[in-house]
Amino acid sequence: MLLPLVLATLLLLADAFPPDPVFCDASGDCFITNSYGTWNTRQVCKVSQIVYPSNEEELLEAVSYGAKNKLKMKAVTKFSHSIPPLACPGDGDGGGHSGAAGLLAISTADYSRGIAVDVNSKAVEVDGGAQLQAVLDEAARHGLALAASPYWNGLSVAGILSTGSHGSSWRGKGGALHDHVLKLRMVVPSGKNSSSSSSHKEFAKIVTLTPGDGDLFYAAIVSLGTMGVISKVTLELEPMFKRSITNMRTSDAGLEDKIVAFGNEHEFGDVTWYPSKREAVYRIDDRVPANTPGNGINEFVGFQPTLALAIVAQRALEETLEAKRSSNGKCIASQAQVSLLESLGYGLKNTHGLRLFTGYPVVGFQHKIQTAGGCQESTSRLLICGWDSAKHALFYLESGITIPAQSIAAFIADVKHLRDSHPDAGALCGIDLYTGVLLRYVAASRALLGKPFDGVDLGFTYYRSRNGSMPRLNMDVWQEVEQMAISKYGGVPHWGKNTPVTFSNPGTGRSLRLERFVKEMRNMDPSGLFSTRWSDRILGIKAMEEQKNPGCALEGLCICSRDEHCAPEKSYHCRPGRVFTAARVCRYENEGS
């Protein structure tokens, strides 16, 4: 077994530093992808031109050039972590007004150095491409903190806003960064006709938006990149504080009765749920005064540089267990992983200097606790991110769906019922290899594409085959959970995650807000240069056409209605859900099963 792992590792190392999300190959063809190397649609996104503005003047020039030449355009971030093809211009397949020749990628990788803190107004103005951790560190240098952020620090500020990414909090303005924006500067098409002017810069303009601009501002702070390119963002800060964190692993008995109260009690709390193990980890996470003893940091294990050999071994194990249809094997492997995470304090360290976990509580400054990361900056071929787009790295899909707070208890009870009624006792073990179900608290937002209600966001990650026609072990369980969350409990999907079919239902309270958003989007970009086939579909402008091809349900390109949408030749057939019977899922049914 060792020799194949070594050989696979050598292959991974040869491919361990994938190109930037925007890159050109030796033949001169240029492409946009994400950090995983594949969109949720598996489509190839081809463009003709890539530009790298480093300041607002150059960004204005880039958008002006695109607008004058009627090019479909998209901004793309340094690391590009969205799973759907949000950053792919035009039709997403090399199409556009004039094929790939009409598609322009605007990378913000070099537009990231501007970070200016105003201590008196407790605010920070940053370039759109500024990396989250750099912003947090600069604010901290002035004794200030940003209350809200996602958990992963390898994101740009503009990328976070564009997808509505969030942390966990119901307090105050909540845990979504877009709800802490004071001002936004965007570069957008000016609407001028190319025949009326010869100067590039007359075809684009800079607009400055504040909450006083009403719907236009609340459309722009979460826009999916459809209104223009975010140039500058001014964020609200507050005096530095610390947080005290204790992770408590216990039985999941009564989780459905405790989940809402726990979110109200703890400002930054969350819950990691392991349904198959009947366990939950409650993260008791609250702010404490800045003079509280403690200098803890957050180095969440999954975001740290990891030995390539370990990644190869984990992927090889999972592929073997999938091939053998071994739920029990996944249960054993995940139990070891969950116990290891617990022993490491889930990456929390009590002291910055020694970087050791010695016990709870872990107390540390906000900017050292609120996010984690590091693997994205690794310069070693031996230490990489687990998801790096190499042939033998981890490969998976992520679901992110926010369920209204008043419905979360019934949803959890249904998932427990599904677990308890499933004939395979280990059917839910697969996600535990990817840290279970993360339950985060998300507050209602005024952003038109933000969450329309106070809710609990459920996030889970699951195995994806490199072969799109290959079914997954116990895939029916998580298809039922996703359909239940959306169709039965009115959940809304995270814009930067999920399979395509998850977006076919706009969810509770979103339809009217989508209409208001589209109105403002068209006012800002009347020619639709920043709109794409993907954005038109998820915004309801065009019908979300399900692909009803053989095997389309295997990766969420459709909800099955016939066996051929699954993989009947591999004994996967289209069947009703076990608990949510309106669901249609691909279930393994072999003789004797």
Image: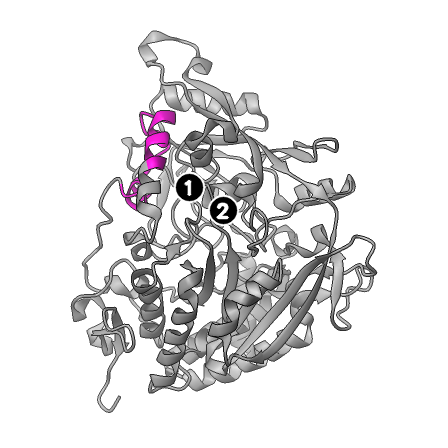
Tell me, for residue 468, which label it has, or none: none
* Mark 1 → mark 2, Cα distance in angstroms: 8 Å
Decide which of 551, 210 is in the foreground and name it.
210
Picture coordinates of residue 280, whole percent (x, y): 55, 75
Q: Outermost residue, bottom direction?
A: 592
Disc 1 + disc 2, Cβ < 8 Å:
yes
Residue 105 occupies which quadrant of the picture? top left
Does the segment drawn in magenta span residue 264?
A: no
Q: In which quadrant is the C terminus drawn?
A: bottom left
Task: Specify the amino acid type for callout 1.
Answer: Ala
**Picture residue at 52% right of the left edge, 58% below the top:** 441
Residue drawn 66% across the image and 45% down it: 146
Q: Earlier in the sequence, mark 1 or mark 2?
A: 2
- Asked whether, in this view, residue 558 is left or right of residue 173, the answer is left
The answer to whether residue 206 is above or below residue 40 is: above
Q: Residues within 10 Å of mark 2 (few under 14, many from 20)?
A: many
- Residue pointed to by mark 2: 80
Callout 1 environment at 10 Å: few (<14), some (14 to 19), or many (20+)? Answer: many
* Label 1: which secondary element: loop
Badge 2 amino acid: Ser
Number of numbered discs on residues: 2
Magenta residue check for 533: yes
Image side of residue 123 versus residue 263, left or right: right
Find residue 464 and report its horizontal and vertical position in percent.
40, 66
In the image shown, does 522 or 532 lie closer to the viewer?
522
For residue 472, what is the image quadrant? bottom left
* Main secondary structure along the magenta-highlighted residues: helix
Q: Position of residue 103 (x, y in %)?
A: 36, 32
Extent of the magenta region: 516-540
- Left or right: where 125 falls relative to 409: right
Q: Secondary structure at mark 2?
A: loop
Circle 1 residue: 87
